[in-house]
Image: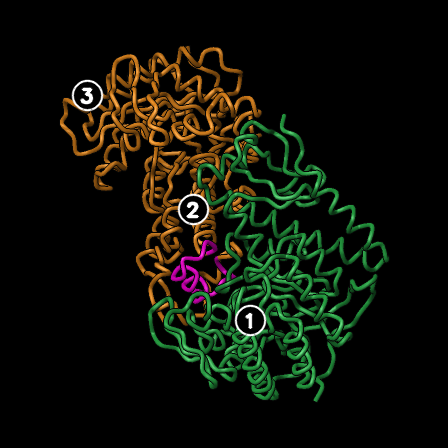
Chain colours: A green, B orange
Amino acid sequence: MTPANHFELLGRDGEARTGRLTTPHGMVRTPAFMPVGTAGAMKGVHWREVRETGTDIVLGNTYHLMLRPGAERIAALGGLQAFTGWNGPMLTDSGGFQVMSLAQLRKVGEHAVTFRSHIDGLSVELSPERAIEVQRLLGSDIAMQLDECVRLPAERGDIERAMQLSLRWAERSKRAFETAAPGYMLFGIAQGGDVAELRHASVRGLVDIGFDGYAIGGLAVGEPQSVMLAMIEEVAPILPEDRPRYLMGVGTPEDLLEAVARGIDMFDCVMPTRNGRHGVAFTRFGPVNLRNARHADDPRPLDEASAWPSTSGYARAYLHHLVKSGETLGAMLLSEINIAYYQQLMRDIRDAVLTRTFTSFRERVHAQWAQGDIAPR
Amino acid sequence: MTPANHFELLGRDGEARTGRLTTPHGMVRTPAFMPVGTAGAMKGVHWREVRETGTDIVLGNTYHLMLRPGAERIAALGGLQAFTGWNGPMLTDSGGFQVMSLAQLRKVGEHAVTFRSHIDGLSVELSPERAIEVQRLLGSDIAMQLDECVRLPAERGDIERAMQLSLRWAERSKRAFETAAPGYMLFGIAQGGDVAELRHASVRGLVDIGFDGYAIGGLAVGEPQSVMLAMIEEVAPILPEDRPRYLMGVGTPEDLLEAVARGIDMFDCVMPTRNGRHGVAFTRFGPVNLRNARHADDPRPLDEASAWPSTSGYARAYLHHLVKSGETLGAMLLSEINIAYYQQLMRDIRDAVLTRTFTSFRERVHAQWAQGDIAPR
């Protein structure tokens, strides 16, 4: 059965799309970038600042939350929104990706994946049904099916096995989600690594099952950007046009721009906060490493034309000092500055698609990045 | 020569006083609590939040700032206010205390203290004149004389020697400050450890020199609270009534209340932010350790009656989770919550003194602290 549609396309320009997705906790403008609030918190950024950057929706990690503080506990406290104070839409991943990257002694079986918690070493079983149960307890607006993600490069045989298992888990996830309240959504995840044929088979299988939206998983896991973009070009055209398309775990500002140009609507990535913690700011001029001594005496802001107060208001010399001194405030400011840059980019992308000026916008943005940072003085 | 007075007493109740101090960067209501922005940043708290808590003035550490990014650099960037974005009054210490506690291979001589920087190991000399020069370069509204602070317990001979040296340095500091712009202030620091006679001699010497305000140094360095309060009782009555009195490096909320009751006007302490980073919140009910498992399922806020949004808005369960998970947001929230509690206490103290209800206010606050935290449920 095809679920009711909560996504509305408002404009297109070439393959690029803009629209809006209605969730139980509010509206999401697409293309949308979801900052990652791993364990119920955005690292170094207050929720009100996340909202002020223009963020409509955030991502929570099921793996972290189920281990600590626990899904049943969060449910008893009123769900993830009431618990954290982020009163907007939330998407949660299934936990599968972190099981692969963080957990110890993991074992993937037909029924479920079992692993030892990286927090207390206890053995945990995550089945497609439990992944859905956990996400429903959390109160996620958008739940993701459990899948198996293979790191690239990988053997075709391994990629195919994981893709087929993910398809069977997709079917079970769909069944487990049938009793969810109206308005809540479940997305399927296309796997298939860097093999076009397997990607096609995965999408066909998912569309047969029928989801509220479709994610492309298993990319940005070690392959070159060209491979990622080639896979999007294989997958996007055969995805249902009226459903949101979500490229998981991506990426740099350039990745986002290029993926939108190929028909993607949603993204999540830890880059803005992680790079912020490491002293790197994303700007109109490309990435700027504040650790560099060239900023030590520079009274100019990162970007005087930015509408985000911290981007236009703080001297590079001050940000450099904070980063060099290991002051928390440095990570805090650069994390919000980066999320704000990502959201400004998404806003500009949406406007460009709506006004059918995306092609020239894309060229202009690339040219500015290529030009690089302002000259030292 | 006695400098022009920038302090105005607005009310008294017993020994407790309330007033206002006019600085080049704005007005300071007293009794005042100064949060500590060590190296040009408040750990885990944005400057706008510091302001929103009701903070009028913050403290910067000369020792840290002179080593990194350097006083001359900050001066070239327009001073500490322009550099950091904190556009309010700032007091800087002289650097002497951190030389004693952080620097390696320090050597105190008549002319100056020499030490190796804890950052790069370079040898640095800090004389009374250089301490003033650095603070003037930083643009501090209130500069402190260089002094030598002795950790207690100590021999009387050591205490006396350090006190006499501090007095000679006070004289040199005053001379070095003579050419400062009008409105900028220099405070002398009374030493003398836990010996009443030496404290008296120190104050007499300082008053003879004549300062804009008087600090009591060398307390809260290992002695019991009773000794600290006894020393304040020795010193406060012989300090000029029309000048602000600053108790350095103090303290707990109770220390502040009791010191105000003995005539103190200004305080600074790292406790609100340091304890916040360690999971402890200061509240109307006394200190609350959020690490405690009793909070894990508690949907109630720290204090539902608090006017500070994070104190009344976040569930204890969420704060507990953030602290247990080591999330930066936990330290950020508890640091702002603690500064807000301190500033609410100072506001209430000022109101109580002005309305001459300080005695009953003080009893009520003590009773509430003694009652302890709300019962678990």
- A172 vs A48: above or below: below
Q: Name the residue rendered at 58%, 60% in the picture.
A: A223
Q: Name the residue rendered at 56%, 69% in the picture.
A: A81
Assign a secondary structure to mark 2: helix
Quadrant of the rendered image containing residue B167: top left
Residue labelled with disc 2 = B342
The residue closer to the viewer here, A339 or A363, is A363
Residue type of the residue flagged with mark 2: Tyr
The CA distance from mark 2 to mark 1 is 41 Å
Residue labelled with disc 3 = B160
The CA distance from mark 3 to mark 1 is 66 Å
Q: Are marks 2 and 3 on the same chain?
A: yes
Residue labelled with disc 1 = A93
Q: Are marks 2 and 3 in contact (CB under 8 Å)?
A: no
Predominant secondary structure, magenta span? helix
Q: Name the residue rendered at 60%, 40% in the picture.
A: A288
Q: Position of residue B182 (x, y in %)?
A: 53, 16
Q: Position of residue B76 (x, y in %)?
A: 56, 22
Q: Position of residue B261 (x, y in %)?
A: 34, 39
Q: Which residues are magenta?
A: B311-329
Circle 2 or circle 1, nearest the eye? 1
Q: Position of residue B256 (x, y in %)?
A: 35, 42
Quadrant of the rendered image containing residue B367: bottom left
Residue type of the residue flagged with mark 1: Asp
Does the magenta segment cover residue B321?
yes
Assign a secondary structure to mark 3: helix
The chain carrying label 1 is: A
The residue closer to the viewer here, A204 or A276, is A204
